[in-house]
Image (tube, rainbow, N blue to C red):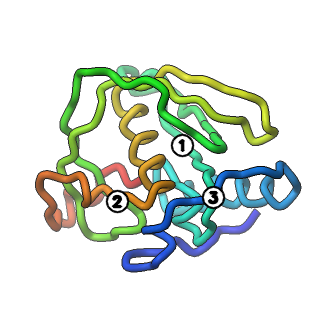
């Protein structure tokens, strides 16, 4: 596994709609493994393939399933060709950061819960019901696949203080 460089704005790949994955070969598995290692090393809670300069519809997310428990272990999600098939009417505001937009955070309104479907890293269909921060992270990463950055959706963007930056979730 290799830690890949994370591209930052204004890299053109971040504004392109990523291509659907059609082949589940060794190169896809290497990409996914590299994305996981890169996300963890950053450190971040999510990463989309365009962030490592690959215009494919692949995301990885690692976040505790049980957000209420401080001891909950993180769950690793890998999703190929993801799509949101249902979204709650209820919206929630939250502060987001992004590994591709270092030094900025913003307040973004997202659906409180979603249902996503796509394919596993091996091409098997998967469907997950997600809520809270996990749902937020998935929406953020899927936006990356469509060339949308959190700053496009933010009602307010700012440069946090150094102490604030240390506790922000970066995706």
Spot occupied by residue 64 in the image (x, y as percentages of width and height): 48, 30
Q: Residue at x 15, y 61 (%)?
A: 157
Q: Which residue is drawn at 57% across and 59% down?
A: 18
Dot 3 alpha-carbon crowd within 10 angstroms: few under 14, some 14 to 19, many 20 or more: some
Q: How far apart are marks 1 and 3 (CA)?
A: 19 Å
Circle 1: element type:
strand
Dot 1 alpha-carbon crowd within 10 angstroms: few under 14, some 14 to 19, many 20 or more: many
Spot occupied by residue 153 in the image (x, y as percentages of width and height): 24, 52
The N terminus lies in which quarter of the figure? bottom right
Q: Which residue is drawn at 18% across and 49% down?
A: 107
* Disc marking residue 146: none
Q: In this view, does 101 lie to the left or right of 158?
A: right
Dot 2 alpha-carbon crowd within 10 angstroms: few under 14, some 14 to 19, many 20 or more: many
Spot occupied by residue 14 in the image (x, y as percentages of width and height): 46, 68
Circle 2: element type:
loop
* Looking at the image, residue 48 lies above or below residue 4: above
For disc 3, the marked residue is 19
Q: Earlier in the sequence, mark 2 or mark 1?
A: 1
- Between 13 and 17, the residue placed more toward the observer is 17
For disc 2, the marked residue is 149
Q: Which mark is nearer the camera, 2 or 1? A: 2
For disc 1, the marked residue is 61
């Amino acid at each position: 596994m290799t830690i890949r460089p994370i591209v930052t704005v204004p890299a053109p790949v971040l504004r392109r709609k990523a291509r659907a994955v059609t082949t589940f070969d060794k190169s896809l598995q290497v990409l996914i493994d590299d994305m996981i290692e890169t996300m963890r090393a950053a450190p971040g809670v999510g990463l989309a393939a365009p962030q490592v300069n690959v215009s494919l519809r692949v995301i990885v997310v690692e976040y505790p399933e049980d957000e209420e428990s401080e001891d909950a272990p993180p769950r690793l999600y890998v999703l190929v060709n993801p799509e949101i098939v249902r979204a709650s009417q209820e919206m929630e505001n939250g502060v987001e950061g992004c590994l591709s937009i270092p030094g900025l955070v913003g307040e973004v309104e997202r659906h409180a819960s979603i249902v996503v479907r796509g394919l596993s890293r091996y091409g098997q269909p998967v469907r997950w019901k997600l809520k809270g921060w996990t749902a937020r992270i998935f929406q953020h990463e899927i936006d990356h696949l469509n060339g949308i950055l959190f700053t496009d959706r933010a009602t307010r963007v700012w440069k946090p203080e150094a102490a604030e930056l240390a506790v922000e979730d970066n995706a």
